[in-house]
Amino acid sequence: MLTARAPVPFEAEIDAALAETTAIYPVPKALVVAVISVESDFRPRAMSRAGAKGLMQLMPYTARRVGISERHLFDPAQNILGGVRLLAVLLRHYDGDVISALVAYNARPRRLYAPIPRNGETPAYVWRVLARVRESSMHLDLRLRSETAP
């Protein structure tokens, strides 16, 4: 028998950010959950050696470009909003190509449908996020089914 799992951490903040950015590009919720999981393991005060901060590991200069000040990078709602804004812009730029958007989110922009770089952490990052998207999609689907079941 399948049982519903616990709610997604920071789900209200994710939903609010998705609602705000849908006009830019509809970002799949499973993608946001997967990026947060891989980037910070849902730790709001996570900080990388390179200086990326918060749940979605935004660099301060990137955060400013999406309207989030550096002092708000450890605020879960603001960090998620900035990360989702960035994903929405990247997905729109890459015509919905999730792999290109993930490469740009993790490393740098690239040509549309260009192969994944074979150097550095980016290939492993992309595959980890995609695997988590699959897990998260299944989890969200099971939760929705259990919530709507009679």
Image: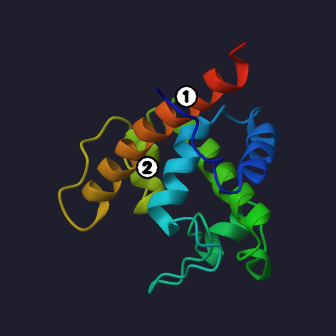
Point 64% across, 25% down: residue? 146
Residue sitting at 46 percent across and 45 percent down?
Answer: 101
Nearest to the observer: residue 16 or residue 100 = 16
* Residue 102 numbered mark, or none: 2
Amino acid on which disc 1 is placed: Leu
Q: Is residue 63 left or right of residue 75?
A: left
Q: How is the image coloured?
A: rainbow
Q: Position of residue 67 (x, y in %)?
A: 78, 63
Q: Nearer the viewer, residue 134 or 95?
A: 134
Residue tagged 1: 142
* CA–CA distance in space, label 2 to label 1: 25 Å
Q: Indicate the quadrant where residue 140 lies.
A: top right
- Residue name at image x 69 percent, y 58 percent: 80
Q: Earlier in the sequence, mark 2 or mark 1?
A: 2
Q: Residues within 10 Å of mark 2 (few under 14, many from 20)?
A: many
| CA neighbours of label 1 inside 10 A, class few (<14), some (14 to 19), many (20+) | some
Rendered-image quadrant of the C terminus: top right
